[in-house]
Image (spheres, helix red, strand yellow):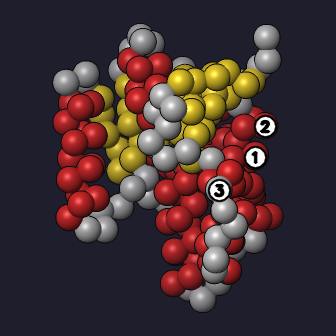
Amino acid sequence: MSKIILITGGSRSGKSAFAQRLAEALPGPRAFVATCPVIDPEMNERIRRHQEARSLREWQTLEEPLDLAAAFLRAGSHSVVLVDCLTLWVNNVMYEAEQQGKTLSETEIAERCGPVLQAARSHGGTVIFVTNEVGMGIVPQTPLGRNFRDLAGRVNQTVAAACDEVFLAVCGQTLKIKPQN
């Protein structure tokens, strides 16, 4: 049985850095599951910098934009698996659905979390998910933006409910919100 941790927060809140420090404090080999596709030169440079920062600390990077459950199988014997991030995974799943002329509902995205959480729980070791807390800002102007916010919020709630620990990152500081002491 794995220990599952969720780290959430806004953009540039320090959540990914905290997740990496937490993972690197744990023994054993580490796998980084990257959900971000390369969409432009600036994103390519961001990804390169992140990979470089991890390369010195013996991470194996697994690129997986859609099938997170399969990523846990590919992670094999790694005792620590860090998935960064669920919000981009939601974006990728939404995009795939749109390419098929479909719109995902909150129920459908929550159902997609089931196999991911089952694979995480079965993996063994420690699994750390990173996600963005997108519901604390303004209401998005477009229906697509509002659907993304709602789906990301549903994923966050679903995953947090299944996690052993949940942290909120704000201004580079983290607050443990589950379990409450």
Q: Is residue 136 above or below residue 90?
A: above
Question: The residue under label 1 is which amino acid type?
Answer: Thr
Looking at this view, name the residue that lies furthest to the bottom.
101
Q: 176 or 48, which lies in front?
A: 176
Q: Which amino acid is tagged 3?
A: Gly
Q: Position of residue 60 (x, y in %)?
A: 30, 34
Name the residue carrying label 1: 158
Q: Amino acid at mark 2?
A: Ala
Label 1 environment density (alpha carbons within 10 Å; few <14, some 14–19, many ≥20): some
Disc 3 target residue: 137
Q: Residue at x 25, y 22 (%)?
A: 57
> Alpha-carbon distance for marks 2 and 3?
22 Å
Residue 132 appears in the figure: yes
Q: Is residue 138 left or right of residue 39?
A: right
- Residue 87 image offset from top left, x and y in percent: 55, 54
Q: Residue 129, how many percent across, how many down?
A: 55, 37
Sooner in the amino-acid sequence: mark 3 or mark 1: 3
Answer above or below: position of 54 versus 153.
Answer: above
According to the image, label 2 marks what residue?
161
Task: Quote the CA–CA distance across marks 2 and 1.
Answer: 5 Å
The spot of residue 23 in percent (x, y) is: 44, 21
**Residue at image point 27% right, 49% down:** 47
Question: Image point 35% across, 61% down: which residue?
Answer: 37
CA neighbours of label 3 inside 10 A, class few (<14), some (14 to 19), many (20+) = few
Label 2: element kind: helix
Q: Kindly state the secondary structure of the residue where label 1 is placed.
A: helix
152 in relation to 116, above or below? below
The reply to whether discs 2 and 1 touch (Cβ–Cβ < 8 Å) is: yes
Say which label, 2 or 3, has the lower sequence index: 3
On-image quarter of the C terminus:
top right
The alpha-carbon separation of the residues under discs 3 and 1 comes to 20 Å
